[in-house]
Every structure is written in structure tokens, then in C-alpha cells.
Amino acid sequence: MNKFLLRFMQVGSAIPFSAFIWLLTFAGFNQTFWMSSLYGVIGAGVMFFGVGYYLERNVREKNRLTKKEYKYIQRNLKEANEKMKKIQKSLFTIRHIRSLKQRMELLRLLKNIQRLTTREPRRFFTAEQFYFSHLDSIMELSEKYAFLSSQPGKNRELEHSLYDTQDTLKELTKIVEKDLNTMLEDDLDDLHFEIDVAKHSIKNRNEIPDETRRLK
């Protein structure tokens, strides 16, 4: 689940519950202002962590993950977020107009993979090569590319290194696209199955004589 959405739901539940507890203890049980405030804070904490636990468990059960697997995936996603920030920063500092479109495409693919895995953590296991290999390579290359392109004087050797780095990033973009397609294989298989079922139903429907349809 998206971290911002999770925190929003936790805070959105905790604040009104805290206010309710404060009002209940202050007006209903004649507690002092400060004691009611203390109970309100405790109630907010209970609701905040309770909602977090419930939503996390719901995501784990939906994705058929153990608590250990879920924590493992979340830890790696957090690390991936930091790497992606570095990649984005590096790619945006590169002053090379011709490669802009390719860099934007690479970022789009990276964000799509991260978004899919965040929404459905179980997909992480079909993208382990991306998270443990390809993402690191992209980060290192993009930082190298940004550094080389920022140099004021460019000789032939430096220009060659820039083109070589750019070509390697192009190849990595193709690899990341394959990573994304691998993550979506099951979805495509399900879609093709549903299409086949629908076509079969339409075919059977069309083969029924009009008189038989009217009798039904």
C-alpha cells in the first residue's frame, strides 16, 4: 500500500477517535481536562497503530505473504525508492537534448515497476533481478553519465565514454521493459483466457437458431 495513503488513513482515523475519547471522558465520566487529554492521546495511538496493523495484515493476506516476507519486500522497496531518487536526479542533470526522450522513457518504466510492486507486493518476487541487479546498474551508469556530461572540456576519449554510457543505458532500458513485461505475464495470460472465454460464449450464442432464442 502507498505509504502516504496509509498514513492518511491512520491519521484520519486517529484524530476523530481521539476527540471522541476526550469528549467521552471529559463530559461523560467527569474527568479533568488534562486526564481527558491523556486518554485522548492514548486512544489516538491505539487507533493509529491498530489501523496500520489491520491494513498491513489485509495487504499481506491479499498477496498471500507472511509477515517476514512482507517486511523483507518493504525494506527492499524503501531502498529502491532511494536509488530511484538518485537516478532521477542524475538523469535530470544531464544536458543532452537528444537523449531526453530515452531518459524519460527509462524513468517511466522504473516508476511503473515500483508502482506495481508497491500496490501488489507479491509481484516483487517476479522482479527480483530488476531490484537486485538492473536498478543498481542504472543508478551507477546514470551517475557516471551525469558526471561526464557536466565536464566543461570534452576530448575525443570523453566523448566516446559519453556515447558508450548512453548506448548502455539504452540497452538497460530494453532490459527494464522486459522486466516489466515479466511482471505482467500472469495478467496477460488471465486477459487472454477471459478473451477466449468471451469469444467462445459469443460463438455459441451466435450458433443458436433465432427460434430457439425466442423460446428461451
Image (cartoon, rainbow, N blue to C red):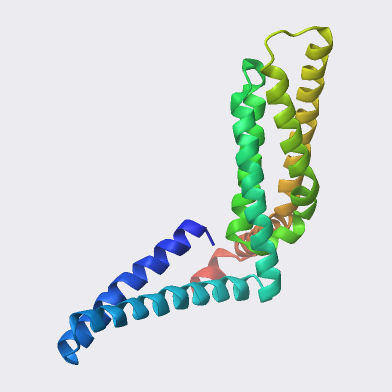
Image location (x, y in percent) of residue 87: 65, 36
Residue 17 rendering spot, x and y as whole percentages:
31, 77
Q: Quadrant of residue 99?
A: top right
Q: Quadrant of residue 60?
A: bottom right
Of the pair 46 and 122, the residue shown nearer to us: 46
Residue at x 57% of width, y 76% of height:
57
- Picture layout, residue 110 above or below residue 145: below
- The answer, for residue 210, to whether it is visible in the render is yes
Residue 7, x across and y down, in percent: 44, 63
State the image coordinates of residue 206 (x, y, percent, origin top left). 61, 60
Q: Is residue 63 left or right of residue 6?
A: right
Q: For residue 29, what is the image quadrant?
A: bottom left
Is residue 216 visible in the rendered image? The answer is no
The image shows residue 48, relative to residue 180, as above or below, that is below
- What residue appears at the point 42 percent right and 73 percent down from the top-left corner? 48
- The number of callouts visible is 0
Say which of 194 and 43 sits in front: 43
Foreground pick, 205 / 160: 160
Q: Residue at x 59, y 27 (%)?
A: 92
Q: Residue at x 72, y 37 (%)?
A: 139
Q: Seen in the image, is 82 located left or right of residue 160? A: left
- Image position of 138 with respect to 181: above or below: above
Q: On the rendered image, what quadrant is the N terminus found in?
A: bottom right
**Viewer-nearest residue: 169 or 196:** 169
Which residue is the extreme one toward the bottom?
29
